Amino acid sequence: MRIFSRVPKINFMAQRKVALGLSILLTLIAIGLLIGRGLNFGIDFKGGVLVEVVYPQTVQLDDVRGSLNKGGYPDAVVQYFGNTSDVLIRLLPQAGTDGASKAASAEISTKVLQALDAQKNHVQLRRIEFVGPEVGKELSEDGFIALGAAFLGIFLYVMFRFEWKFSAGSIAALCHDAIMTVGFLSLIQEEFDLTTLAGVLAMLGYSNNETIVIFDRVRENLINLRKQPVMDIINLSINQTLLRSIITHFTVLMVLFCLFFFGGKSVHSFSVAMIVGVIVATYSSIYISSGVTVLLDIKREDLIPPEDHTKANSRDKDGAVV
C-alpha cells in the first residue's frame, strides 16, 4: 500500500505546447465535421410522432422493433414507458405527411397497430402526439441557451472562487470538451436528441469538477509553497490529484459502459456522449485548463491579498521560513 501513497513526479507541463497545438488541430477538425456532416438530430429536434401502446403482458423491445421494421418503420425509437408492458414509440417525420392533420394521425396510428399485429397481440393505443418542426426549433434554441447559461455560470463561479485566469482556463477546457464530444457524435452520426444533450451537459459538469479539484490544489500549493516556481507547483498539484482522478474516471467509465452495453437504445446516445466526454475531460483537465492558465501568466500574487503578500515579504527579509 505504500507505493500508492507516493506522489508521482510526471512533468505534465513540459508537453503543454504540443498538447495545446494538438487540441487546436482536433478542435478545428471537429468544427469541420459539424459544418460538413452536421448532427443526426432525433425526433426532439426534427419533429415527428410519439405513439404509446399497451400490451396485455410484458413485451420485449427487440420484438417490437422487429415488427416495426417489417412494417416500414426501421428508424423507430422504442422504449419502455413506466413498466414493461407500456411501450413508447418515436417515429421520425415521413415525406408527404402533414403532421398537423387529424387524418395523418389516424393513418399513422393505423399503420403502427397493423405493424404490431394489434388484434392478434391485443395491443391497445393509449395516445399519439405530434412534435412539429416549430417545437423542434424551440427545443434547439433552448438547448443552446442551456449550454450558454452553463458556461456563464461556471465562468462566474470559478472566477469568484479562484481568479479570472483560472476561470478562463476552465472555460477553455469546457469549450474544448463540448466541441470534441459533439464533433465525435457528428463523425459517427449518433442520434442527437434531448437525452444526448443531457449527456453533454452532464459531461461538462463532470469535466469542470475535475478542473476544480486540480485548481484547488494549485491554489493551496501556491499559497503554502511560496519559494517554488509556479510551473513546478502546477506539476505537483496535478500529480497529487492523479491517483484520485484515475480511480474516479475508472469507476465512472465502468458505469457508463454498463449503460452502453445493457441500457438499451433509449440511453445509448447518452452513454456515448458521456464516455467520450469523460475521456476528453481527463485530458483537458490536465493540459487545457492548466495550460491556458500558464499562458495567461498566473502568478502567486494573483491569489494572495496585497496585505498578506506584504507580510510574507517582510517575513522573508527577517529570515523566517515560508
Image: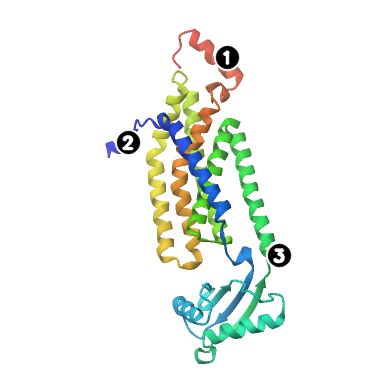
Q: Disc 3 residue type?
A: Glu
Residue 134's label in the rendered image is 3
Residue 99's label in the rendered image is none
Foreground pick, 71 / 306: 71
User: In the picture shown, does residue 114 fall above or below 83?
Assistant: below
- Whether residue 202 is visible, yes or no, is no
Snapshot colouring:
rainbow
Q: In the rendered structure, which disc, 1 or 3, sits on the residue that comes first in sequence?
A: 3
- The residue tagged 2 is 5
Q: Disc 1 residue type?
A: Thr
Q: Position of residue 41 (x, y in %)?
A: 58, 62
Q: Position of residue 77 (x, y in %)?
A: 53, 71
Q: How many numbered marks does the figure carry?
A: 3
Image quarter of the N terminus: top left
Q: Disc 2 residue type?
A: Ser
What is the crowding at mark 3: few (fewer than 14 residues within 10 Å), some, or many (at least 20)?
few
Q: Which secondary structure lies at badge 2?
A: helix
Say whether residue 160 is left or right of residue 267.
right
Residue 103 found in image quarter: bottom right
Foreground pick, 316 / 296: 296
- The residue tagged 1 is 310
User: In the picture shown, does residue 315 fall above or below 252?
Assistant: above
Residue 242 found in image quarter: top left
